[in-house]
Amino acid sequence: MRALIGCYPHLAVAGFHRYSTYRSAAVAALTTNTAFGLMRIAVLFSVLGSRQQVAGYDAASIASYVWLGQGLLGVVILWGGHELADRVRSGDVAVDLARPWNLQFALLAEDYGRAGFAMLIRFVPPMLIGGMLFDLRWPQQEHTWALFALSIVLAVAMSFAIRFLLSLSAFWLLDARGVTAMYGLLGGIFSGLTVPLAFFPDWAYDALWWTPFPSLLQNTIDVFVERGSPLPLLAHQALWTVGLLVIGQLALRAAERKLVVQGG
């Protein structure tokens, strides 16, 4: 048991090293994120216009929202990360299930390694660029930094839990590309990446609060800019993360019973 638990930190390190080998791709993604960040901030500043605030967001909060979103997009991924679905379709998942580990925890550990590298190359540079070009709203209280780090940890786990469930759907659908594409479309809108969720009508915002989507990006951004109390935001993330990970375990057990390997 101790050896089994000890394998997960090694998988996190392996995930970090694996993604650190794609440095050219990371730099290309950073360049793209920066370009889109400049376009998004121009659009949202035009919405703000001559007003002091829109839905509680002033110029500094909007600038922080944009650059935090661009930086976190590479950490809390919404698109991609569905290798498990490909392995289910090819049958290679049988090898993964035969290994002496919990597949969900193993892939989560690897995803944390990926997120750690993304923090260095995909999050920090956009924030530095945004800080040089615009007046960002930085945390005013020291403990906010720790809460922000905790929120990122929960957001990464939340993103993984959703992607894990979508990938497992390949056991029944054979091809999960349809559901993953739909998730990518809805996730970008309902997670707060496209525009702040506070820009939505009150009824839409209230409805979205009961879904896991705000926990992917919007809650983490709001923790950083100290928009309201952080405790409900973190509680929302924690409850959805734990709930989806538990559902993932149940779905994994059902998938193991569903798996049929040719030749026995």
Image (spheres, rainbow, N blue to C red):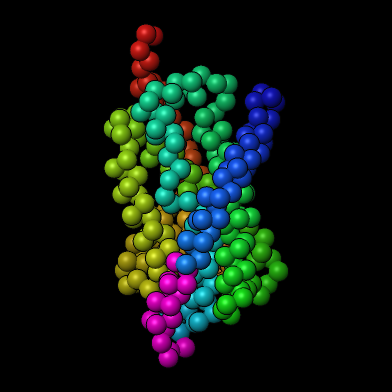
User: Relative to 251, does residue 179 appear above or below in the rendering?
Assistant: below
Q: Is residue 32 visible?
A: yes
User: Relative to 248, does residue 99 appear above or below in the rendering?
Assistant: above
Q: Position of residue 241 (x, y in %)?
A: 50, 47
Instruction: Provide the residue span drawn in magenta.
Output: 36-52
Magenta span main SS: helix
Question: Which corner quadrant holds the C terminus?
Answer: top left
User: Relative to 198, does residue 182 appear above or below in the rendering?
Assistant: above
Quadrant of res 135: bottom right
Measuring 58% from the left and 59% from the top, which residue is drawn there?
123
In this picture, residue 239 sits left or right of residue 197: right
Q: Is residue 15 visible?
A: no
Nearer to me, 83 or 190: 83
Magenta stretch holds residue 105? no
Question: Which corner quadrant holds the N terminus?
Answer: top right
Magenta stretch holds residue 44? yes
Q: Position of residue 219 (x, y in %)?
A: 50, 62
In this picture, residue 52 sits left or right of residue 181: right
